[in-house]
């Protein structure tokens, strides 16, 4: 399971703690549930930016530094943790991932919403720091669908797929126990899942 790192809160809040939270939409869920697919569709339809995370995981073919992720060495990543440069970070499947402070500060300055596609532990950290953030948990309709999607995506080895499947249940239990997700979105038909996420975001916008 991933391991979250709770660094002291940096000063991610030039715009003020929960003022900033109102600009954040967290999309979490087990690997393969469809977070990236949904996030991209929602970002495109609503014209919203997606936060670019930093990671120590090796770059996959087709990924661009600064666009898909900021690819860092472990030393660089840990140095940024020490300097409080992440609003949240976690170890996920053996690699470090984190949301740079600058990403959320920019959202506060520009004034719109920012989508954060991050793991459950990162989502919980965001909700602790910014209770007004909207946090959605994306789920596959069942274990068979999850297995099929992870296998079909072809970005992980057989061993990695098995590990992700093993950890999926634990991740969902942890998220439910923490009680910090505003809603669960079952991604069965993609169109319906995207529609539901947009509905949640529009409701949030109308109260902001
Ligand atoms: P995650 O970001 O949660 O790891 P992805 O968005 O990469 O998941 O989706 C995993 C795989 O499942 C991808 O190949 C994607 O095209 C596919 N997928 C996503 N949503 C659906 C859906 N509703 N029905 C069938 N396949 C889907
Ligand atoms: P991948 O390596 O497949 O792109 O992502 C692996 C996992 O890391 C996914 O569950 C993804 O949501 C999560 N992740 C990506 N960026 C971040 C981040 O900035 N913080 C946290 N906590 N998780 C992240």
Image (cartoon, grey):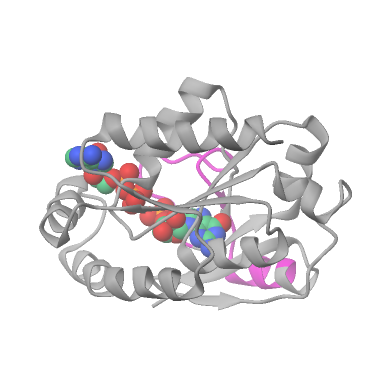
Picture quarter containing residue 5? bottom right
Q: Position of residue 18 (x, y in %)?
A: 78, 53
Q: Is residue 158 above or below residue 32?
A: below
Of 57 and 147, nearer the camera is: 147
Picture quarter containing residue 144? bottom left
Quadrant for ligand 1 reads: top left
Q: Is residue 134 above or below residue 171?
A: above
Picture quarter containing residue 9? bottom right
Q: Which residues are magenta?
A: 57-80
| Mark count | 0
Q: The C terminus lies in which quarter of the figure?
A: top right
Q: Is residue 6 above or below residue 108?
A: below
Instruction: For residue 138, say whether it is visible.
Output: yes
Of 78 and 11, nearer the camera is: 11
Q: Position of residue 143 (x, y in %)?
A: 15, 62
Which residue corresponds to the image point at 86% horizontal and 51% vertical from the top-left? 16
Instruction: For residue 58, say whether it is visible.
Output: no
Q: Position of residue 89 (x, y in %)?
A: 60, 67
Q: Position of residue 112 (x, y in %)?
A: 70, 31
Which residue corresponds to the image point at 64% horizontal and 32% vertical from the top-left? 205
60 within the magenta span: yes
163 within the magenta span: no
Which residue corresponds to the image point at 56% horizontal and 34% vertical from the top-left? 203
Q: The N terminus lies in which quarter of the figure?
A: bottom left
Which residue corresponds to the image point at 39% horizontal and 43% vertical from the top-left? 36
């Amino acid at each position: 399971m991933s391991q979250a790192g709770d660094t002291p809160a940096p000063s991610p809040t030039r715009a003020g703690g929960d003022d900033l939270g109102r600009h954040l939409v967290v999309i979490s869920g087990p690997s393969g549930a469809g977070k990236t697919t949904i996030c991209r569709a929602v970002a495109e339809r609503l014209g919203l930016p997606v936060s670019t995370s930093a990671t120590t995981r090796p770059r996959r073919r087709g990924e661009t530094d600064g666009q898909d992720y900021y690819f860092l060495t472990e030393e660089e990543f840990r140095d940024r943790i020490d300097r409080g440069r992440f609003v949240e970070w976690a170890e996920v499947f053996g690699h470090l991932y984190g949301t740079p402070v600058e990403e959320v500060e920019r959202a506060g300055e520009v004034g719109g919403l920012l989508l954060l596609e991050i793991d459950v532990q990162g989502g919980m950290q965001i909700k602790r720091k910014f209770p007004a953030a909207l946090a959605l948990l994306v789920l596959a309709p069942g274990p068979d669908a999850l297995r099929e999607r992870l296998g079909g995506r072809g970005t992980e080895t057989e061993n990695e797929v098995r590990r992700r499947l093993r950890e999926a249940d634990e991740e969902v239990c942890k998220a439910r126990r923490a009680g910090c997700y505003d809603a669960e979105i079952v991604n069965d038909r993609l169109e319906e899942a995207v529609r539901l996420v947009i509905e949640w975001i529009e409701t949030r916008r109308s109260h902001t």
